[in-house]
Image (spheres, rainbow, N blue to C red):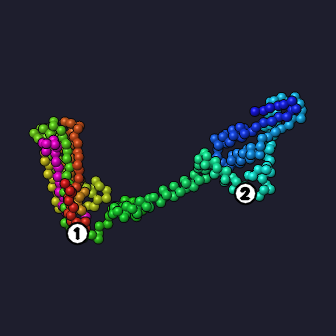
Amino acid sequence: MVVVDGSGEVETGVNCFSFGCIVVSLVVTRVGWCWQLVAVLVAEDLGGRWQWVMKEEGMWQSEAVEMMFLGRVSSTLKPLQRSRFFSSNSGYDFSKAIQELNKEMESVFGEPPTSSLSGSIDNQSMAQDLESAPTNVTQSISSSGLTHIDSKGEAQMVDISPKEITKRVAVASCKVILGQKVFDLVSANQMEKGDVLGVAKIAGICGAKQTSNLIPLCHIINLTHVALNLTLNPRDLCVEIESEAASNGKTGVEMEALTAVTIAGLTVYDMCKAASKDILITDVQLESKSGGKSGDWLRKK
């Protein structure tokens, strides 16, 4: 509030003005120059209220306000001998004063936003972590026993030349859920394409022999035996398929057994799809394996 008395003396209280500047400064930014302005205003308020004496009588109130504003700006730009923050002769540590003021402000208004410098440092750290991630993942994969991944994280075909030749056997299975309509047609051998189970059986055997062509990193194996068994299950309205593959060699035949039941299931679907699109191939899984370094394995029921 501004008061002009008869003698031309103008007096103003700057507490509200300073507080408004502090709020605006906090909203706009939290960088160092803004804190310096706040420190100047606070220091002035601590010293008391400003007073200006207008030597010319009859000065209008608006002109007095303008004079007070210019006086404040000019005083702010000058070093304040009585300010504990900016005094050049007091020997007070300027940077320490700013740090103390920042701490006081942070205790009231919270932590300042992350600066662009610290953000760039964080981004550099993140980039370094991402660059080192593939190496760490590769080391983890190698230690877990995934032999188809080399030290650089690239796919490879495993060298099996040091392995011993042993008898290898694997059994796999799957189900093809037909639904009532298709199940009845297959059971009565009335599908337009012919004998569903017979064709699927032959397809499964052929599929087992083509495993190395279908699965990129599989070795070419001399199979000594492939057998498929397809059974109609009236309770689940499905075809249960089971395959067995065997070989005397340096690597297992699990993939050959799994490929056999998968191709057989796809063949059942192909021969029955004209009657229904709801056919479902499910539960493709390895049931057991024997031979090789890892020994025998049997799925728990």
Up/down of 126 relative to 6, above or below: below
Q: Earlier in the sequence, mark 2 or mark 1?
A: 2
Prevailing secondary structure class for the magenta stretch in the rendered image = strand
Instruction: Answer whether residue 178 is visible to the viewer in this image.
Output: yes
x 19%, y 66%: residue? 167
- For disc 2, the marked residue is 93
Horizontal side, residue 190 vs residue 70: left or right: left
- Is 239 colored magenta in this rendering? yes
Q: Residue 293: horizontal and vertical position, in percent? A: 25, 67
Q: In this view, does 287 lie to the left or right of 38?
A: left
From the viewer's perspective, is the residue at label 2 or at label 1 nearer? 2
Query: Residue 237: horizontal and vertical position, in percent?
Result: 15, 41
**Placement of 66 over or under 294, stated as above or below:** above
**In the image, is residue 121 above or below residue 50?**
below
Q: What's the magenta region?
A: 233-251
Q: Which amino acid does label 1 sit on?
A: Ile
Badge 2 density bin: few <14, some 14–19, many ≥20, Cα 10 Å: few
Residue at position x 61%, y 49% from top? 106
Locate the C terminus by quadrant. Answer: bottom left
Mark carried by residue 233: none
Q: What residue type is labelled 2?
A: Asp
Where residue 289 sits: x, y (%)? 21, 61
Q: Which mark is residue 165?
A: 1
Q: Which of the 4 image quadrants contains residue 270?
A: top left
Q: How far apart are marks 2 and 1 (CA)?
A: 82 Å
Quick one: 149 or 135, which is closer to the camera?
135
What kind of element bears circle 1? loop
Q: In this view, does 140 lie above or below 85?
A: below
- Residue at (23, 60) in percent of width and height: 253
Q: Could you say which is closer to the camera, residue 215 or residue 54?
A: 54
Quarter location, residue 210 = bottom left
